[in-house]
Image (cartoon, rainbow, N blue to C red):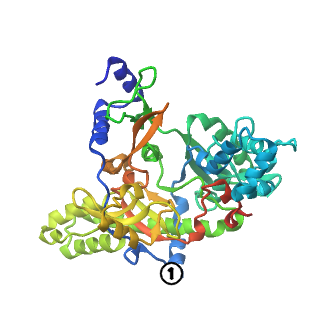
């Protein structure tokens, strides 16, 4: 199947032949859909907090969090193309039309008509170089194309999201820095941030980082340690044609494609941190709304610290020399079930004390993640569910709609009963009870990827997406879902979202 030239190309990417053969096998057999057992809902899978609970966790985080090595991790490599889908569609329709024809077409499209009328309110307006005589098509081309802002190909992190004044118009990257400085700064006065970017955008990110660093350090006295990494080439996946044979470029080389954000588990694994906060680059808020978001991050951090301390305490007892009473170990099993949603099987009753001890150690000695969940008000995104794995273990998981067989009435009924969705608001504990860093790639479920259909040069192909970063890539972590206020979720999915109330400064 592979020529000597292929093998050389494969070796240059650091990919093993066994991995490629496994990928091809996935194309042939597909991935099994998620086996949903029940939705995670408030009181059963999702923790809801009272005012007193919030204050308790805030105190824990503010007392202990700054002493830890904390990092803010943001996937930021994707281009903003989908954010401007409507503008691209309008530009295609308007292209080649006369000024009068364009005016008539724009009037029929309420969305584009409003956009052009409200353009001076957008935070990137002052960056546009107008002569005043541009047609609607020329204005859109200035926003999207290389002759202007080139926003259609830039990453979201480098787009201006908020306008405080003509001289203070911030990118989403800068807003993340300013928000993170309020809760993720260590006792040493250092804010550590890490972004995954594409090589093509690194220079621009570094320029923006230098600009933001100078401003924020001067205003706050905090030192910013901002680093970047790329998706690793060994995580690329082979593309195949419809008959599952390797897809080849015009020069006969193999076509590899990025494996999706699930590949970033390796970037996450490379961070030398105690605690890592993760969210998407487009989920930001202006200063007037940051306080509630910061408070929410601190609460999630406090929950993680309390759970981590309890798990570490149990593991020290389980691995110590002292003999543990069976009732003590059964208390630990109850903690796993009630606090972390671990399905404690009836078979545990049949285990002797040493077997129970081994099960508890195996179950608890894992990375921990606390995930905020928002009430579902129609936003797209994955959701929290109890899921049964192939070996039969039931655990809390974040599941994307693409992983669910909606043709199965039972599975569809479970989805219908779900109440919350995943806004990507996580805090992760990545060290074990001895203080050693977990090797995160050991906790991936490789059977949770998916296959999508694409095309290159008009030729159809199949692409393989690795298990998502907060889906299958973290499938074997200990997981705790927590209800968070919808006000903490304000993503920018389309350019029009920039004028929604939650993005007005």
Mark 1, other Cα within 10 Å: few <14 / some 14–19 / many ≥20: few
| Label total for image | 1
Of 307 and 347, which appears nearest the observer? 347
Q: Which residue is mark 1?
A: 50
Judge left or right: residue 497 versus residue 305. Answer: right
Relative to 200, does residue 333 appear above or below in the rendering? below
x 31%, y 67%: residue:
409
Which sits in the foreground, 79 or 212?
Answer: 79
Classify the position of the N terminus by image quarter: top left
Q: What percent of the width, then of the height, locates residue 72?
A: 55, 53
In the rendered image, is residue 448 in sight? yes
Q: Is residue 219 visible?
A: no
- SS at circle 1: loop
Residue most extreme to the top = 4
What residue appears at the point 48 percent right and 39 percent down from the top-left corner?
231
- Residue 312 occupies quadrant: bottom left
The x, y position of residue 174, in whole percent, is 68, 52
Q: What x and y, as percent, mark residue 88?
A: 65, 45
Give residue 14's quadrant in the image.
top left
Determine the image quadrant of residue 430: bottom left
- The quarter of the picture where the C terminus appears is bottom right
């Amino acid at each position: 199947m592979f020529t000597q030239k292929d093998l050389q190309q494969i070796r240059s990417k650091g990919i093993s032949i066994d991995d490629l053969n496994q990928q091809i096998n996935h194309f042939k057999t597909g991935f099994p859909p998620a086996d949903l057992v029940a939705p995670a809902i408030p009181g059963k899978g999702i923790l809801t907090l009272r005012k007193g609970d919030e204050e308790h966790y805030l105190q824990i985080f503010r007392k202990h969090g700054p002493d830890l090595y904390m990092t803010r991790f943001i996937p930021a490599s994707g281009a903003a193309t989908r954010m401007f889908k409507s503008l691209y569609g309008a530009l295609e329709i308007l292209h080649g039309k006369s000024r009068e024809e364009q005016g008539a077409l724009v009037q029929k499209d309420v969305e584009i008509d409003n956009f052009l009328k409200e353009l001076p309110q957008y935070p990137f307006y002052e960056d546009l170089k107008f002569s005043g005589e541009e047609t609607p098509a020329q204005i859109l081309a200035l926003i999207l194309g290389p002759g202007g802002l080139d926003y259609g190909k830039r990453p979201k992190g480098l787009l201006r999201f908020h306008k405080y004044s003509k001289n203070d118009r911030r990118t989403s990257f800068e807003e993340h820095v300013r928000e993170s400085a309020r809760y993720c700064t260590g006792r040493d006065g250092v804010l550590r941030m890490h972004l995954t970017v594409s090589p093509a955008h690194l220079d621009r990110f570094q320029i923006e980082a230098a600009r933001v660093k100078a401003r924020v350090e001067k205003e706050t006295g905090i030192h910013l340690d901002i680093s970047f990494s790329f998706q690793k080439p060994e995580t690329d996946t082979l593309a195949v044609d419809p008959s599952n044979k390797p897809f080849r470029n015009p020069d006969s080389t193999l076509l590899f494609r990025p494996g999706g954000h699930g590949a970033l588990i390796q970037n996450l694994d490379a961070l030398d941190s105690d605690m890592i906060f993760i969210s998407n680059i487009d989920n930001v808020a202006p200063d007037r709304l940051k306080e509630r978001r910061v408070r929410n991050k601190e609460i999630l951090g406090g929950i993680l610290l309390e759970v981590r301390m309890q798990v570490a305490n149990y593991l020290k007892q389980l691995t110590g020399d002292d003999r543990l009473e069976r009732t003590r170990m059964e208390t630990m099993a109850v903690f796993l079930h009630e606090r972390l949603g671990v399905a404690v099987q009836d078979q545990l009753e049949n285990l002797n004390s040493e077997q129970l001890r081994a099960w508890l150690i195996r179950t608890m000695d894992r990375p921990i993640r606390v995930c905020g969940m928002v009430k579902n008000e129609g936003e797209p995104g994955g959701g929290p569910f109890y899921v049964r794995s192939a070996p039969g273990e039931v655990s809390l998981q974040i599941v994307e709609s693409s992983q669910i067989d909606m043709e199965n009435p039972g599975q569809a009924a479970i989805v219908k009963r779900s109440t919350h969705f995943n806004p990507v608001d996580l805090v992760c504990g990545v060290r074990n009870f001895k203080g050693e860093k977990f090797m995160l790639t050991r906790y991936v479920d490789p059977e949770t990827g998916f296959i999508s259909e694409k095309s290159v040069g008009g030729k159809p192909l199949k692409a393989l997406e690795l298990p998502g970063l907060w889906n299958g890539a973290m499938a074997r972590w200990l997981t705790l879902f927590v209800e968070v206020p919808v006000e903490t979720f304000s993503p920018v999915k389309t350019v029009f979202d920039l004028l929604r109330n939650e993005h007005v400064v």
